[in-house]
Image (tube, grey):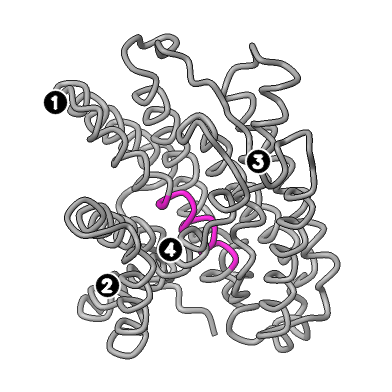
């Protein structure tokens, strides 16, 4: 019932710690190259692509591995972002990594609550419930004056990056690189564990999995908690990146569409799928934003998603895996 070949990823020779070390080495090379280029624009663009890698991978843990399509991406993402706004007002000297951990914990708790309250919902009914969650969270934040409400809130970005020096955007880029390493290592570890096989059993046939003794309740709670937590961590640095956060930007449709489109385009069966999709779609969107307009971002993601669903349902990575087999 579970396709272990597909679940094993595309780099079977790398396991555990060696894989993490390879990710860290790649991240170090990317950051060193960015500093060597000395372009602030490159760091701004790179941050966006890395953010979508984290966001797409987080969505894929629940939507790809477990088969529960989450339309409430913006709810978890904005919880992380607005947690930073609150913490920055209460404790201005708090380090950003601590804010990210707290924002991820808050979003993860909401994910657990969502999983628990929607246990009996499957398929499109679960997706509608997550969409309703996004609407509820946006309404609450829009009417919360402490975080600016509908007016939004300004967050002052430090001029100098801590520890590494240089512009603060370089620090944000480095933080997001670290999040990518953590999220990708977690996603790959899930694929190669009993947890991943349990997720796949739920995705293939939840009723049969439950009848076979798979603890579907516990696994769904783990999936919703992990997915929501990582989405919150992806959103936590956003206020320092944009310096002004309002509900329109925190709950932007771009995040919801891209978080779903990128794993589907890259492939949902492997940790590498969201990475490929984010680099392809995110890079194309940034190019079109500079040359044409940012208004085409959602259009590009939507058209590519429809095309790949029709022509290559398994995504880019899935095509290569099928040829390899």
Instruction: Report the predominant secondary structure element of the magenta stretch.
Output: helix
The percent position of residue 306, horizontal first and vertical second, equals 36, 83
Disc 2 and disc 3: Cα gap in Å?
30 Å
N-terminal-most mark, 3 or 1: 1
N-terminal-most mark, 4 or 1: 1
What is the quadrant of the N terminus in the image? bottom right
Foreground: 55 or 6? 55
Tag of residue 79: none
* Residue that label 3 marks: 104
Magenta span contains residue 274: no
The percent position of residue 74, horizontal first and vertical second, equals 60, 57
Callout 1 crowding tier (Cα within 10 Å): few <14, some 14–19, many ≥20:
few
Circle 3/circle 1 CB separation < 8 Å? no
Callout 4 crowding tier (Cα within 10 Å): few <14, some 14–19, many ≥20:
many
* Residue that label 1 marks: 37
What is the quadrant of the C terminus in the image? bottom left
* Residue that label 4 marks: 258
């Amino acid at each position: 019932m579970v396709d272990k070949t597909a679940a094993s990823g595309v780099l079977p020779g790398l396991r555990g710690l060696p894989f993490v070390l390879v990710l860290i080495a790649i991240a170090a090379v990317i950051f060193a190259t960015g500093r060597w280029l000395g372009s602030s624009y490159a760091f701004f663009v790179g941050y966006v692509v890395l953010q979508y890698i984290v966001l797409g991978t987080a969505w894929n843990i629940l939507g790809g591995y477990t088969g529960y399509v989450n339309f409430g991406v913006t709810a978890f993402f904005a919880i992380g972002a607005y947690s930073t706004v609150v913490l920055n007002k209460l404790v201005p000297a708090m380090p950003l990594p601590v804010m990210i951990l707290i924002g991820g914990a808050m979003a993860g708790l909401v994910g657990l609550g969502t999983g628990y309250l929607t246990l009996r919902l499957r398929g499109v009914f679960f997706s509608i419930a997550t969409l309703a969650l996004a609407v509820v969270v946006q309404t609450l934040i829009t009417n919360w004056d402490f975080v600016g409400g509908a007016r939004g809130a300004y967050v002052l970005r430090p001029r100098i990056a801590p520890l590494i020096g240089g512009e603060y955007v370089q620090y944000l880029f480095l933080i997001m690189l670290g999040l990518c390493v953590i999220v990708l290592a977690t996603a790959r570890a899930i694929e190669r564990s009993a947890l991943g096989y349990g997720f796949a059993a739920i995705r293939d046939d939840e009723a049969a999995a439950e009848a076979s003794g798979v603890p579907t309740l516990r696994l769904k709670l783990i999936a919703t908690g992990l997915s929501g937590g990582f989405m919150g961590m992806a959103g936590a640095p956003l206020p320092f990146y944009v310096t002004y956060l309002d509900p329109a930007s925190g709950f932007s449709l771009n995040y919801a569409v891209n978080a779903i489109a990128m794993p589907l385009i890259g492939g949902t069966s492997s940790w590498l799928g969201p990475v490929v999709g984010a680099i392809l779609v995110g890079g194309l969107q940034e190019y079109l934003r500079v040359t044409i307009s940012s208004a085409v971002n959602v259009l590009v993601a939507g058209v590519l998603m429809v095309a790949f669903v029709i022509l290559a349902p398994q995504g880019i990575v899935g095509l290569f895996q099928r040829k390899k087999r």
